[in-house]
Amino acid sequence: MLTERLRRGQREARLHLLWSFTGQGTHRARAELEVLSPSRHTASVTFTYACRDLPPFEW
């Protein structure tokens, strides 16, 4: 969980999410943002991580 507290008069915040995936295969991931005050709001996004076994790259 990330927490960001705004100063009085501050109107925006930037939250940076760090993802780490390893290995082959696929994984469906979801990030959710929950604003607790001054009024509650929620937003979410989903994406699929996919890693396939590819042949080596040749120059």
Image (cartoon, rainbow, N blue to C red):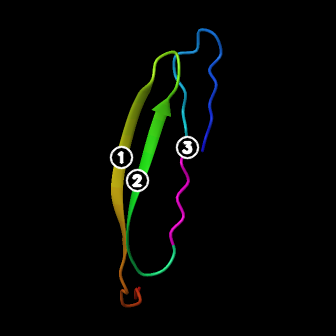
For badge 2, the amino acid type reads: Arg
Residue at (40% x, 33% y) in the render: 42
Callout 3 touching callout 1 (CB < 8 Å): no
Callout 2 touching callout 3 (CB < 8 Å): no
Q: Earlier in the sequence, mark 1 or mark 2?
A: 2
SS label for mark 1? strand
Whole-percent x, y for residue 49 in the image = 38, 66
> Is residue 18 shown in magenta?
yes
Q: Up-down: is 44 above or below 41?
A: below
Which disc number belongs to residue 16?
A: 3
- Neighbor class of circle 3 (other Cα within 10 Å; few <14, some 14-19, many 20+) is few
- Neighbor class of circle 2 (other Cα within 10 Å; few <14, some 14-19, many 20+) is few
The residue wearing badge 2 is 30
Q: Up-down: is 13 above or below 18?
A: above
Whole-percent x, y for residue 28 in the image = 36, 63
Left or right: where 38 falls relative to 57: right
